[in-house]
Amino acid sequence: MNLRHFNYLCIKVDETTSTNDLMWKYFKEITVEEGTFILAKNQTNGKGQKGNVWLVEPGKNLTMSVGLTPNIPAKNAAYMNVVAALAIHKTLLDLNIDAQIKWPNDILVNEKKICGILVENQIQGKFIQKAVVGIGLNVNQTIFADQINATSLANQIDKQSNIESIAKSIHLNLDAYYSLLKDSNIKQLTLLYYQHLYRINVPCKYADSSGTFIGIIQGIDAFGRLKVKKENNRTKIYDIKEITYL
Ligand code: BTN
């Protein structure tokens, strides 16, 4: 895991609306070298999944966006999330935290969310031309007033951490997993993802368009969709938004 393709190009800002939006602005205005990333102390309009707002306690958490020019088939778009999740998982593991990846975009520790990922892809023709990988990792915040299901690095290891060092580690790990994707190593990525997948092989409650059911997550398919064995022993494939964890 020590092959480096990205240079370490970190743009540090005190405050921006959203690091993802700022990276898209850079893409429009300047030539962005692959792997350049923005690290912000605060966001005033942080974006989460499904149009949600991503709130951070200024200066306490990691808020970064990496600019990429993948030029990979659009059908592999979900694997942009996979490589980001694996990179964050590896960084946490190096800090002795064995996190789990909750498909498709969350990183959990002991059932609590420590990190969220927002990948935005720009597709032209059948290829992803540009992408912004946004990562929000709770680092030094210890109190989550309205989010009982949130945790942070500080809550897990009982000490404060250097945010830029963690960003550096995620960047390094992203470089390695992203290289696998660029080399079309989908099978290897699928296997790695499987090893850290939340609720893998455990019967749990879910809901889909036909109602609630007990299902068993079996992994992801070549398009990054979730494979779930249902009560009738048939495996159903779910795209994002087609299944809810209960
Ligand atoms: C989620 O809802 O779980 C995804 C959260 C993603 C938040 C990060 S913080 C850095 C980047 N900039 C944003 O505006 N969002 C992402």
Image: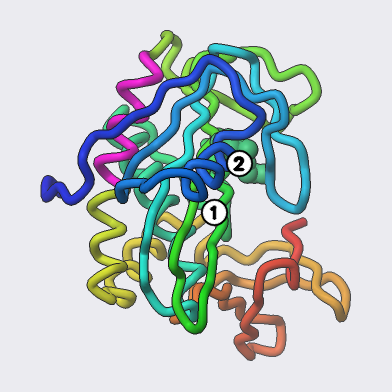
- Magenta residues (range): 162-173
Q: Residue at the location (15% across, 47% down)? A: 4
Measured as percent of width and height from the top left, residue 50 is found at 75, 53
Residue in the foreground of this view, choosing between 51 and 115: 51
Left or right: 45, with 87 as reference point: right
Find ligand 1 in the image and state its quadrant. Answer: top right
Q: Quadrant of residue 211?
A: bottom right
Secondary element at tag 1: strand
Is residue 139 in view? yes
In terms of secondary structure, what is the magenta stretch mainly?
helix
Mark 2 residue CB less than 8 A from any atom of ligand 1: yes
Q: Quadrant of the C terminus?
A: bottom right
Residue in the foreground of this view, choosing between 65 and 1: 65
Indicate the amino acid at tag 1: Val
How are the residues colored? rainbow
Q: Residue at the location (24% across, 61% down)? A: 179
Secondary element at tag 2: helix
**Residue at numbered disc 2:** 21
Q: Are marks 1 and 2 in contact (CB under 8 Å)?
A: no
